[in-house]
Amino acid sequence: MADRRLQVFYTVARLLSFTKAAEELHMTQPAVTFQVRQLEEYFNTRLFDRTHNRISLTEAGQKVYEYAGRIFELYSEMENVVKEMTGDIGGAITIGASTTIAEYMLPSLLGDFRKKYEEVVIHLKVSNTEGIVSMVENNVIDLGVVEAPVGNKNLVVETCLMDKLVAIVPNDHPLAEKEVVTLPEIMEYPFICREEGSGTREVIEDYICHADGCKEGLKIAMELGSPEAVKGAVEAGMGISIVSEATIEKELKLGTLAKVELDPPMERPFSFVHQKQKFRVRVMDKLLEFARNYCDQEQMA
């Protein structure tokens, strides 16, 4: 309903990139450029300075950006009020989730939500925890779900549930017969680790920092970008690892991996993170309410 030219301009101004704006808006870059030029023609002034393959807002562009933000906030408030009166739940929402959550938690949650609210369109972006927090900070996504603590105090962070982590080893590994393993024992073997910026890696590194007599660190043999890759490397005998217990249900049933409890236990929060907007689209409030109930049921299971 809001002016399309203004929406496109606002996205370019927020990201300071025509390319990134085109990706986010699912448009071609020439189409994005055309919309911005139309708005510049309407105001009869340049809104962006373009130099050395970089763009920045002109003084007029900065003013348009500020007013556009206020316009979209008022639009959201109006939409929420009308939908509250009619009881309608619809529209689109963009969610970002760290890899573990996107692969093992969100499919069932979002599937159940869509069954209840069929008019809602959900876009999902997947990255590591660091990337998801950055997307929330830059308003690329409406809601993030992450697997590590969030340091930005300007964001709203709400713990959904606590996730248990365990050691995984090949079935013929010396640790496979143990019920419990300590960190010093794990540090004797090659370790398969997630990449920098991963919530799982951050939690493991914090666990090491607070463990007694563990100043040397892990013998990292490989750094991989997903839980599936980590499990595959462990199954192949390339090392051992620590992963979310929620990610290994299939492997335990098939008997392709052995799970060993950690001593002391290791847990980390799965959390919702979003901006402190005064007004949010109603569908986001409904999704948060639905997700809280889902997490409560999972915690009790």
Image (cartoon, helix red, strand yellow):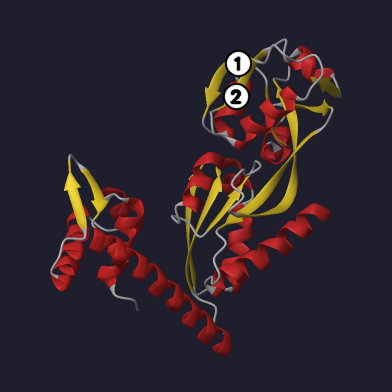
105 or 254: which is nearer to us?
105
Q: Position of residue 222 (x, y in %)?
A: 55, 18
Q: Going by the image, does 28 lie left or right of 81?
A: left
Front position in the image: 54 or 28: 54
Q: Position of residue 285 (x, y in %)?
A: 61, 70
Query: Which disc is residue 137 wearing?
Result: none
Looking at the image, which residue is at 78% across and 59% down? 297
Residue at left offset 53%, top offset 29%: 196
The residue closer to the viewer here, 273 or 286, is 273
Write down the residue under mark 2: 193
**Residue that carries the numbered disc 1 in the rendered image:** 220
> Which class describes the residues within 10 Å of circle 1: few (<14), some (14-19), or many (20+)?
some
Residue neighbourhood size for the residue with mark 2, other residues' Cα within 10 Å, grouped as few (<14), some (14–19), many (≥20)? many
The residue positioned farthest toward the bottom in the image shown: 85
* Residue under the point 64% across and 17% down: 191
Q: Is residue 21 visible?
A: yes
CA–CA distance between discs 1 and 2?
A: 7 Å
User: Do the numbered discs 1 and 2 sit on residues whose CB atoms are within 8 Å?
Assistant: yes
Where is 161 relative to 35, above or below?
above
Q: Nearer the viewer, residue 290 or 73?
A: 73
Q: Earlier in the sequence, mark 1 or mark 2?
A: 2
Q: Which residue type carries mark 2?
A: Cys
- Residue 117 appears in which quarter of the rendering? bottom right
Asked if residue 301 shows in the view, the reply is: no
> Which amino acid type is shown beneath numbered disc 1?
Ile
